[in-house]
Image (tube, grey):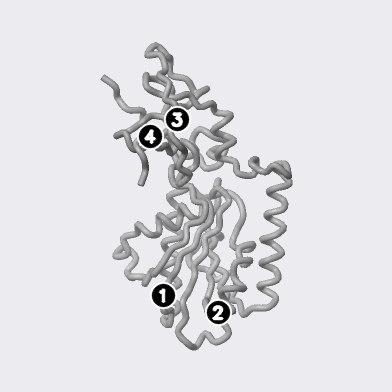
Amino acid sequence: MLGANSTFCLPSLWVAPALPFSPVPETAALSDQKLICRQEDKNLAVLAPLCMSGFVACSLQELEKQYAPSRWSHRMDKEAVIEAHVREVTEGTRRAQATMQTVLHVPYGGSDGEKLDIYLPTDPSEAFPLVLYIHGGYWQFLSKEVSGFITPPLVTQGIAVVAVGYDLAPKGHLDLMVAQVRHSVAFIVQQYSKISGVYLCGHSAGAHLVAMVLSTDWEEYGVTPDIKGAFLVSGVYDLEPITHTSVNNLLQMSRPAPPLWV
């Protein structure tokens, strides 16, 4: 349970300790150079433009760093971190596909990005649980083609794994991606009638997409998936702060209208 002074100023689900809230002068002009945290209902804090009193300053430079995990390493620079991650997931996927029964590039829609890589257990004729994995990459990087690295310990236990592809930014916008991953779930449960339960797993941006899947009105898709669990790993759920960072250069998310103060 969040304390009275908890804050979500940093990436969501990272709950910072109480901060010393220093008031900003009421004469401060609206500025794109700073963001600040605002207490709301004395329970949560959100990012907002620097425009009113009762806020704490947070520089755009600091915000950019907080939303760039590749900059957090003390051992490697940003590019080396990204290269190491891509190398590991690519090699892990190559090894998985070399040793497992797969059905690759299965279309679940008409777009180039709407494809699935399916990793099947040894005996798919029996009922099996299925893990649907949605990759991260800030909705603009990575792909299902490097998502098979998670499969070996699952498939060897009789669990099918489906790596979901979706249209990345700038081709895909966020609303489209959400619709695509929802469609992928509906498609896969219609294709495999012997699924004993669906488990959703998403990393980073993929965790955000899993959260959106969990809020789906399945009547619109004509199915009722038997979703038994979800694993949301290092997810990003509060998207408003991202609109102030370079992550949004390709996403082009619009900012909510500022509140009217009286």
* Side (left or right) of 30 relative to 137: left
Query: What's the mark number on residue 197?
Result: 1
Crowdedness near tag 2: few (<14), some (14–19) or many (≥20) residues, C-alpha within 10 Å? few
Which quarter of the rendered picture does the C terminus lie within? top left
Q: Amino acid at mark 2?
A: Gln
Residue name at image x 45 percent, y 68 percent: 199
Q: Amino acid at mark 4?
A: Asn
Q: Is residue 13 above or below residue 162?
A: above
Query: What's the mark number on residue 19?
Result: 3
Label 3 secondary element: loop
Tell me the CA gap for discs 1 and 3. 43 Å
Residue 238, image quadrant = top left
Tell me the CA gap for discs 4 and 3. 7 Å
Crowdedness near tag 3: few (<14), some (14–19) or many (≥20) residues, C-alpha within 10 Å? few
Q: Is residue 218 above or below residue 247?
A: below
Q: Is residue 22 above or below residue 149?
A: above
Return the residue nearer the eye: 5 or 249. Answer: 5
- Residue 96's spot in the image, x, y percent? 66, 72
Residue 4, image quadrant = top left
- Residue 178's spot in the image, x, y percent? 43, 54
In this figure, which residue is indicated by the disc labeled 4?
5
Mark positioned earlier in the residue sequence (4 or 2): 4
Mark positioned earlier in the residue sequence (1 or 4): 4
Q: Amino acid at mark 1?
A: Gly
